[in-house]
Each structure stands twice: as structure tokens, then as C-alpha cells.
Image (tube, coloured by chain):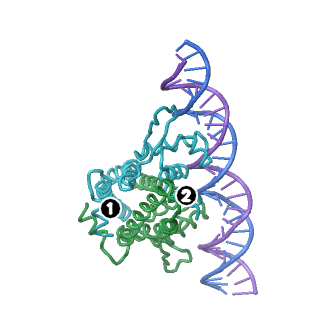
Chain colours: A cyan, B green, C blue, D purple
Amino acid sequence: MEINVAREKFIETWGNLGSSWGINKSVAQVQAFLLLAPDPVSTDELMEALQISRGNTNMSLRQLMDFGVVSKKNVPGQRKEYFVHEKDIWKWAPKIMAVRKQRELNPVLEVLTELKEFSAAGKASIETVFETQVGEIHSFSAKVSRVADKLCSSKSDMLLKLFKLFG
Amino acid sequence: MEINVAREKFIETWGNLGSSWGINKSVAQVQAFLLLAPDPVSTDELMEALQISRGNTNMSLRQLMDFGVVSKKNVPGQRKEYFVHEKDIWKWAPKIMAVRKQRELNPVLEVLTELKEFSAAGKASIETVFETQVGEIHSFSAKVSRVADKLCSSKSDMLLKLFKLFG
DNA sequence: CTGAACTTTCAATATTTTCTGAAAGTTTAT
DNA sequence: ATAAACTTTCAGAAAATATTGAAAGTTCAG
């Protein structure tokens, strides 16, 4: 297989994976392109390679920077901005997980905590089931949350340990 | 808080969580409603409670049945079909993860395996980076895949062990 | 300052995804 | 067999999401 065909296949596949897990396709494709790039990449290169607009490219890069996995890199003597992606998957994957957990899971945990405080006077089966289920989901989510925090915290090598134990 | 307000809040929150992780909002809301239901629920009850169409309700139930977390329940003397959701979160959560892994992660793993076979003659930096990155992502994904299989397999109590060790 | 080079924003547009509802299909009672 | 009761399907409509591109904003060399 030719290298560029292989690269495109990877970028395409990665974009689709993103889509089905709530990450914008362009964002995932920009990430894929940056991961495969040996050198810092400019906005124009991304636009050209992925056939997307300047606006889209800019927003996608911003999102990746918000995840903390992409940073600006100044190339000496160049006005233009260049971007690089953290290349160590043991660093970037946990970062993305950590941010997504913070954004999308923590708010749910808060609501669950609030709903757990609900305590009915009557205790009809509708109340009983509510308490049981919210309780179960809350406790389960809280466990997941704690594990995720440990696995994603940069200081710890929990991810490695996990794979040693369970892989 | 009144029980119905609490129920609606849960259903709403759960629907939004689903949305941001690639699960249709209606599907997530139907799941939430079923989880909170003390008794088997009919299509009409769901339509009424969630204000969604018959078609949508039917499709959502089908998806939940495909995940293996909802089943039909015949109520004696009733023509209509009723549905129940597995109530034990230690059973239903791993089931959903397992199906999603199968559907959405395994195909990516296959592509990665294929791309790993790519071996360039020249070995310019573009090829080197490609090999390194695809190699890293493949190896990382394969580890995640193995852990996920273990955690989600119904026979094992790996999930419990994980939470004991890392929770 | 000035204006060229570059980046960011955002209203309008396009695309994708989801939802509806009526028609077709199925099952069951008589 | 017939028809009522119920379920499934799917083409079109609606809604949500993503994308564009040009205008506004910023930066910086001269």
C-alpha cells in the first residue's frame, strides 16, 4: 500500500470513530493528520490536506488545544502559526478522557447526587424504584468517576498497572 | 422535590448524557424511563410519557433490545406487548459497553492491524511517523480491547475487582 | 502610524441525524 | 375467512449539527 493511501485510510477511520463517540469528525481528522505529521503543521496545510475550510480548521485546532493535546509551535522566521500534537499516546489519551469526564460526566454526577437526596413520604413502588435506580447509577458512576480520575491523572501510572493486571 | 419532577430530571439528564456519547437521545430516555418503571411498560405509555412517536418508540426499544438490556414481557390476558429493562446496573452497563466495543471499536482495530502491515521501502520521516503512531495506537487500542472484554464478560467479576483495586 | 500577513468569529448554508405518522404487516379471537 | 388489535417499516419532514467563507480582529515589520 502506498503511504498516502494508508494515511488517508487512517484519517478516515479515525474520523468515523470520533463521530460515533461524540467527537466532531473534522476534529478527529485534524488530530489524525497531526499525529501522522513529522513536523509542525500550518492551518493552510490542514485545509489543503483535509479539504476543509479555514473556519473549521481553526475551530478544530482550538478544540484539540482545549483538550490539551495540541499546542502552537513557532517556527523561527515564520509569521504563520504551526501546530503539533503530543505524540505519546499514554499522555494524550488520558488527557482527552479527563477533559471529557470533567465536561460530560461530572455534571451528571452532580444531578444524581441531588436526586439521591430525594426522599418520599409515601414510598409507593414508583418512589422505591426511583431511589434504588438512582442510587445504583449514582454509586456505579461515582466508582467509574474515581477510577477514571486515577487512570487519567498524569502523575500516576495507574493506566500501566491496569493493563498489567487485566490485559 | 416531587417524584415526577425528579423522574423527569433524571430522564432529561440521561438523554443528554447519551447524546454526547453517541447514543440517541430518545433511546437514552426510553432506557431511563424503563429503569424507573416498577412494572412492565407498553409502547403507548412510553409515547405518552416521553412525547415521542410510535415509530421512534419502536426503534428505540429495538435498539435497547439489540443491546440486550431490554426484553419483551407478556402480561397475561393482554394483547399488547410490554417491556422491561434489566435492573441490575452491573449487568446492563457491561452489556452496552460490550456491544458498542464490538460494533465501533473492533472494526477500527481491524483497520489498524491492516495498516500496521504497511512497510515502506524508503523510510522517509513520513513513513517512520506513520509506523510509530499507527503502532502506538494499535497497541494501546488492543490493550483497551482486552481489558474491555474482560470487564464486560458476564462470567467474570473483573469489574468488581477493578473497583476494589482502583476505586 | 500603516498596511500586509495572518487568525478568529459568526451568520448563513449545507449536511447529517433524528423523528413522524400513515401504510403495510402481523397476530389473534371469533 | 374476517376483522380488530397491535407492531413494524420507511419515505418525507423536522431538528440538530457541522461547515463555510467573508468580514472583523490582531499582530508586527517597516
> How far is the residue under mark 1 from the one under mark 2?
39 Å
Q: Residue at x 54, y 74 (%)?
A: B81
| Helix, strand or loop at mark 2 | helix
Residue type pointed to by label 2: Arg
- The first of marks 1 and 2 along the sequence is 2
x and y, in percent, of residue B60 in the image: 54, 65
Q: B89 or C29, which lies in front?
A: B89
Rate crowding at label 1 as few (under 14), some (14 to 19) or many (20 or more) other CA atoms within 10 Å: some
Q: Residue at x 44, y 45 (%)?
A: A70
Lateral position of residue D19 relative to residue B139, left or right: right
Lateral position of residue A149 relative to residue D5, left or right: left
Residue hosting label 2: A7
Residue hosting label 1: A140
Q: Do dots 1 and 2 share one subunit?
A: yes
Lateral position of residue B8 relative to residue B26, left or right: left
Q: Could you tell me which chain the residue with mark 2 belongs to? A: A
Q: Where is A134 relative to C30, above or below?
A: above
